[in-house]
Amino acid sequence: MSLALLLMLATPALAEPRLPDFTELVDKAAPAVVNISTSREVERSMTSSRQFGGQEVPEIFREFFGDRIPMPPGGAPNRNEEPRQSLGSGFIFDEDGYIMTNAHVVKDADEILVRLNDRRELEAELVGADEKTDVAVLKVEADNLPTLELGESSDLKVGQWVAAIGSPFGFDHSVTAGIISAINRTLPQDVYVPFIQTDVAINPGNSGGPLFNLDGEVVGINSQILTRSGGYMGLSFAIPIDVAMDVADQLRDDGFVNRGWLGVRIQPVSKDLAESFGMEQAEGALIADLDPRGPAAKGGLQAGDVILKVNGEEVDHSTTLPRLVGEVTPGEEVELSVLRDGEKQPITLTVGEWPDVVANQGDSDGGPVRLGITVQSLSELERRQLGIKQGVRIVSVDPAGSAAAAGIRPGDVLMSIGQQSVESAEQLADMAANLPQEQVVPVLINREGRSYFVALRPVSN
């Protein structure tokens, strides 16, 4: 009876599931996780962010307005320069000093400082950043740098344990853990990333830090949270390391990311639209409009076509299409399965290169003029919202380029150059190639609803 009693008492203990132990993972990985701080000089064209009508502005209003507190009547603008800092995380993935982080962590930074686990502080150079995937690569000069082992995000499964190390609110090497809640999540404004969704506690400052599996391998980069509280009480999303490394390799080799482009405007296929097209279920991406100069129009696609597959992979939702096309190298052929007039048909066409990339490239022999900007064409809706008839949005500015010297910033809309209207990114590339070298030209830009000219002196490569 004593033996039976002992067995009965032992059975529940043996049946209890064991929770994972992250101590070995943290000991091994923490040295290669870094804290990132940035600073930039911002022009205060309104009143001080801390003063409004001579009174101190409460912190909550500065959260909303930042450096753009509305100026009280009769107030004089203050255009002094003041530094701003941001905090984020990153990790060393190459012993030569290459660090991965989020593009939004280092956006518009004039100086980037990396603090290592051993308390060394190093100034970092921005190798490149891709806002579409929110990936950036930095470079530091140092010896004996620890690195992290990279895993395969394609092997992830929902429900498996993961851990994050980062600097939430500036607290270095904070560790949180949880499980993968979902994979291949597409967010409305980030259609190029099949996000990993987790319940790991992520807060401001964790951005750019690594997400680990239980083997201590990096499987993702913590990027953003969806929350109503502003804190970790929400959904956390990480960029799969497979996607991030493809972007990082291109940034290291070329300084920009080359992704495929069709030149179509798409919309979801609703249940009612699916019925009207004779479809059994709502799927695919419906082409609402085409760029007449784009690859899709030249390849025979039409408005009203529903793209169902790209190279054999199903387009289960319209948001899946940009990612699948973006993975195709420009200049390569792509096989599409298209529903037209109730019948499926194959269409093969050559994928083009994104216009914003084309506009940022110059001729290696010094022929076309390099403006030092990356631009993106505006949609008709964006133009109506801005109240303008032409222009392209400036996505990034090379600090060493002629545009930066002229005071042009990311977010500005370039409306004309040399008194010629700019209608698209491709047109700007052609115009830039024909601008006279070393001769000042007037450039009309729109910044926050106000238009004015700047003088730009193009230089050759």
Image: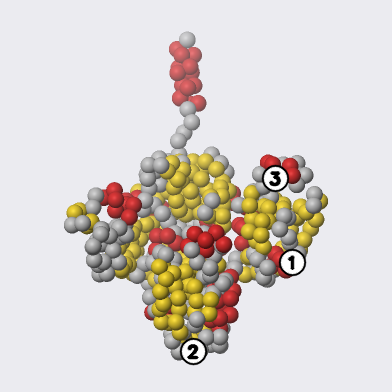
Q: For numbered disc 1, what is the local secondary structure?
A: loop
Q: Earlier in the sequence, mark 2 or mark 3?
A: 3
Tag 3: amino acid: Leu
Q: Nearer the viewer, residue 439 or 157?
A: 439
* Nearest to the observer: residue 62 or residue 234: 62
Q: Nearer the viewer, residue 148 or 158?
A: 158
Regarding mark 2 in the picture, which secondary structure is present there? loop
Q: What is the quadrant of residue 401 in the picture?
A: bottom left
Please tell me which of labels 2 and 1 falls first in the chain: 1
Q: Which mark is residue 238?
A: none
Q: Earlier in the sequence, mark 1 or mark 3?
A: 3
Query: Residue type at mark 1?
Result: Gly
In the picture of the structure, the residue carrying the numbered disc 2 is 437
Q: Is residue 400 left or right of residue 339?
A: left
CA separation, marks 2 and 1?
36 Å
In the drawing, does residue 56 fall left or right of residue 208?
A: left
Q: Which residue is mark 3?
A: 273
The correct choice, above or below, for 406 with respect to 242 in the image is: below
Mark nearest the camera among 1 and 3 is: 3
Using a 10 Å C-alpha cutoff, classify the residue at mark 1 as few (fewer than 14 neighbours), some (14 to 19) or many (20 or more): some
Q: Which residue is disc 1 drawn over?
A: 299
